[in-house]
Image (tube, grey):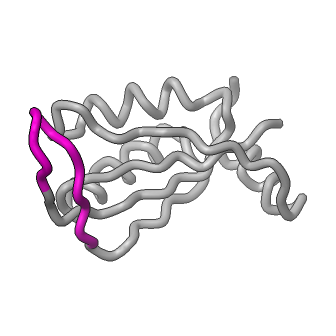
Amino acid sequence: MSAVLVYITVPTAEEGERITRLLLERRLVACVNMMAPHKSMYWWQGKIDQAEEIVIIAKTRAALFDDVKTAVCEMHSYECPCIVALPITDGHAPFLTWIEQETGAD
């Protein structure tokens, strides 16, 4: 099993909770951490912009990333949401097994 962390940013905690609940209900992720609001600065439409955002970090299997991405896009309010997979190269074996057990079948 190849596990990944999926890094997602959302504009509000409420939107983050809706997306998180959808991912969990569909068994696409085993766990999600929602981080406190922070300031993001970025290029958008030719200029530097900034916003307060919430970071979501989801734990899942690499094989489910495309389904996670599709589900997030269904509910996300951004035109171009940040949804990226970061590989887990090593970890506590029981935790990695738990991720596999708690996510849907391939």
Residue at position x 25%, y 61% from top?
A: 40
The quarter of the rendered structure image containing the C terminus is top right
Q: Where residue 92 sits: x, y (%)?
A: 86, 64
Assess whether residue 93 is covered by the magenta stretch.
no
Tell which residue pokes out farthest to the bottom in this image: 36
Q: Where residue 53 sits: x, y (%)?
A: 23, 62
Residue at position x 56%, y 39% from top?
A: 85
Left or right of 4 in this view: 14 = left
Assess whether residue 41 is covered by the magenta stretch.
yes
Magenta extent: 38-49
Location of residue 3 (image quadrant): top right
Residue at position x 35%, y 41% from top?
A: 82
Location of residue 13 (image quadrant): bottom left
Q: How many labels does the image show?
A: 0
Q: Where residue 9 sits: x, y (%)?
A: 32, 52
The quarter of the rendered structure image containing the N terminus is top right
Above or below, 5 against 65 in this view is below
Above or below, 28 against 9 in this view is above
Location of residue 43 (image quadrant): top left
Above or below, 69 against 17 in this view is above
Q: Where residue 64 sits: x, y (%)?
A: 60, 30
- The secondary structure that dominates the magenta segment is strand
Tell which residue pokes out farthest to the front in this image: 47
Left or right of 96 in this view: 70 = left
Residue at position x 89%, y 58% from top?
A: 93
